[in-house]
Amino acid sequence: MAKQKPGKKSSSSLAASPRQRVSASPLVAVLMGSKSDWDVMRAASDTLREFGVAHESRVISAHRTPGLASEFAGHAELRGIKVIIAAAGGAAHLAGVIAAHTTLPVLGVPMKSDALNGLDSLLSTVQMPAGIPVGTLAIGKPGAINAALFAIAILANSSPELREKLRGFRAEQEKKIKETKLD
Ligand code: RP5
């Protein structure tokens, strides 16, 4: 792999395009196998935005765009990305393929599928053979939100500001539960 300073890579297929949602110097990449995943995966993007984390959201398919998948993963670290979230449904190999091409932490989100309700996606994401890890979250929207929170927790290891925001988020969540009144 060519030596390059983090945050500098910008080849034609990796550069921002009107079809992708990108921010300058993204720390997190939210990848999904199809636009049909976006309804769910926008919850990951929304969560990252609420915490002020620069990120990009892209459609990259392990089987429909295999070259782009390996190119993206191979250059992600050089571009300054710290965590990759990869969502896919069915024979969901996107997270595993991405993880095979980078040592960055990869978080997999199984999408709910028509045929098997996401069980296929879950098993194909979670059952990575030893050697190439994919941290797998829950099926669908809870997994999308938790993948973003997990990415934030990873980033918070080197960002006291983010750690404080995460504490605030937990405190707010706790407060809401304690204040819950049933009819
Ligand atoms: C996977 O196939 C995608 O991640 C998506 O969840 C599933 C179906 O894709 P479409 O046929 O809707 O494009 O690659």
Image (cartoon, helix red, strand yellow):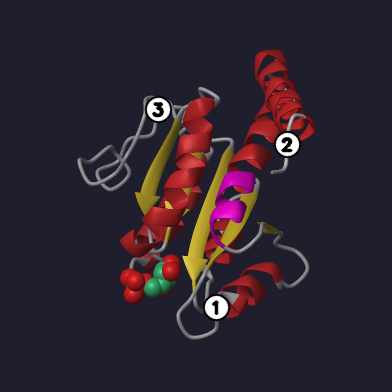
The amino acid beneath tag 3 is Lys
Q: Residue furthest front?
A: 183
Ligand 1 image-quadrant field: bottom left
Q: Quadrant of residue 14?
A: top left
The answer to whether residue 141 is magenta is yes
Viewer-proximal residue among 128 and 152: 152
On screen, residue 156 above or below 99:
above
SS for callout 1: loop
Nearer the observer, 174 or 94: 174
- State whether label 3 is within 8 Å of ligand 1: no
157 up-or-down from 122: above or below: above
Q: CA distance from mark 3 to mark 2?
A: 52 Å
Q: Nearer the viewer, mark 1 or mark 3?
A: 1
Position of residue 28 in the picture relative to residue 66 (left or right): right
Q: Which residue is mark 3?
A: 8
Q: Which residues are magenta?
A: 140-146
Residue 165 part of the magenta segment:
no
Say which label, 3 or 2, has the lower sequence index.
Answer: 3
Looking at the image, which is closer to me, 126 or 46?
46
